Image (cartoon, rainbow, N blue to C red):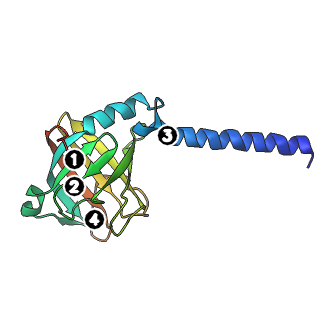
Amino acid sequence: MKKEGMIKIRFVLSIGAIAAITAGCANNPLGGSTIHPAAARDYQELSGTWQLTRAVVNGRSVPESQLRKTILITDGNTFRFPKASGVGTHPAGTFTVNPNTRPKQVDSVGPGGPHAGQVTRGIYEILGANQYRACWSPPGAPRPTKFASTPGSGRILQYWKKTGPVPPQ
């Protein structure tokens, strides 16, 4: 192949790589001023203290006693469970939203625990000013396409109600 052709191919591949990196940062609040307005709005709406009101794990409903003690705090693109409950995808970490798909997509990564560094793929829907639902696949598994957790799926379906703002740490 001619040198000119190789240079053109490298140029096109470089543009593609830059586009992919830029797209990946577009919905990340830490990515600077490239936040898509819809993503910024969802990060804002999802920030706060949340109470789990309903959950299904691998097709089985989570007991009311477990729901009552499951609290989630989200702040921008970070999350944490201040009380150990075992119902979350990770005890703490970061998440990235993509509100431009249907259903909306979310990816979560936790720095610790048995799935440290693994991406957990999910979908989410904001149901109003103070409610949202999410459905998560096991770490490394394909993203769910609907809000359901059936026996053998390994999926977690969650319904959350906002109980307040982000508390100081």
Judging by the rendered image, the residue that carries numbered circle 1 is 73
Q: Is residue 28 visible?
A: no
Judging by the rendered image, the residue that carries numbered circle 2 is 81
Which amino acid does the dot numbered 4 rest on? Thr
Sequence-earlier tag: 2 or 3: 3
Sequence-earlier tag: 2 or 1: 1
- Please give the name of the residue rendered at 21% of the width and 65% of the height, measured from the top-left corner: 86
Q: How crowded is mark 4: few (under 14 residues within 10 Å), some or many (20 or more)?
A: some
Q: Nearer the viewer, mark 4 or mark 3?
A: 3
Which amino acid does the dot numbered 2 rest on? Phe
Callout 2: SS:
loop
Q: Which of 42 and 137 is in front in this view?
A: 42
Q: Is the Cβ of the residue at disc 3 closer than 8 Å to that at disc 1?
A: no
Percent across and percent down for residue 118 are 42, 62
Q: Extreme right residue here?
A: 2
Which amino acid does the dot numbered 3 rest on? Cys
Q: Residues within 10 Å of mark 1 (few under 14, many from 20)?
A: many
Q: Nearer the viewer, residue 13 or 78?
A: 78
Side of 145 where 148 appears, left or right: left
Q: Residues within 10 Å of mark 2 (few under 14, many from 20)?
A: many
C-alpha gap between disc 4 and disc 3: 33 Å
Q: Is the Cβ of the residue at disc 2 closer than 8 Å to that at disc 4?
A: no
Q: Residue 25 carries which label?
A: 3
Callout 3: SS:
helix
Question: Quarter-wise, where is residue 55 in the image?
Answer: bottom left
C-alpha gap between disc 2 and disc 1: 6 Å
Percent across and percent down for residue 26 are 48, 36
